[in-house]
Each structure stands twice: as C-alpha cells, then as structure tokens.
Image (spheres, rainbow, N blue to C red):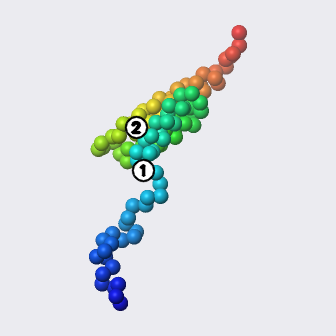
Amino acid sequence: MAGFSHGTRRHPRSRGRTWSRTGPDRATLGIIGAICAVAGFFVLGIILGPVAIACGWLAMGRTWSGARPVPALTALVLGAIDTLLALIWLAGVATPGNGLY
C-alpha cells in the first residue's frame, strides 16, 4: 500500500502518454533527407528522391504551419525536383526510336 497514493506525484505523465524516443529526431531526419536529395541527383534519383521527400516531410512535423527547419525544407524541395527529373529521364528513355541513328 505504500506506493498506492504517491504514484503520480513523482511521475506526472503516465507511461502510455510519453513520447517514444526510439526513432530519429526531426533534425536528423532533415539532414538525412538533404543528403538523400543531393545524392539522388547523381545516382538512383527515382528511389532517393521520394526518400528525401518523406524524410523532409517527417522532419517538418507533417505540417506546413509553424517554423520550417532549413534542412527539412531543403530535403523536401530537392527531393521533389530529383523525383521529377528522374521521371522525365525515365520517360525519355522509354520513347520509341531512342538511340537510333
């Protein structure tokens, strides 16, 4: 009975409402997204572009309102450009008569 009445005084938040700290934080996601976006311009743009968009979106807190950290916004914009360029390149490769004299 000793801990019956004093359980919430030392720890005001219950265990179910605390934020899980197992995943990467927003700053790390923004940096990872920016690196993926820059690397996507050189290799595997069709894969790294959407990864950069997802990392940037998660780093922004999945919202457009509020403060936007620079790495997150950079990852989002460069990832979108990278994905668009990769799609244009893939469409250009698939055109009939490509590579013929």
Disc number placed over residue 25 in the picture, else none: 1
Q: What residue type is labelled 2?
A: Pro
- In the image, residue 40 sits, relative to residue 26, either above or below, namely above
Q: Quadrant of residue 91?
A: top right
Q: Residue at x 55, y 25 (%)?
A: 88
Label 1 environment density (alpha carbons within 10 Å; few <14, some 14–19, many ≥20): few
Q: Name the one closer to the observer, 19 or 86.
A: 19
Label 2 environment density (alpha carbons within 10 Å; few <14, some 14–19, many ≥20): many
Q: In which quarter of the image is residue 96?
A: top right
Q: Residue at x 69, y 16 (%)?
A: 99
Spatial separation of the CA atoms under disc 2 and disc 1 = 13 Å
Judge from the rendering whether residue 51 lies leftward or rightward of residue 61; answer left or right: right
- x%, y% of residue 98? 67, 17
* Residue furthest right as drawn: 100
> Which quadrant of the rendered structure holds the C terminus?
top right
Q: Mark 2 points at which residue?
A: 71
Look at the numbered disc 1 and give the secondary structure of its residue: loop
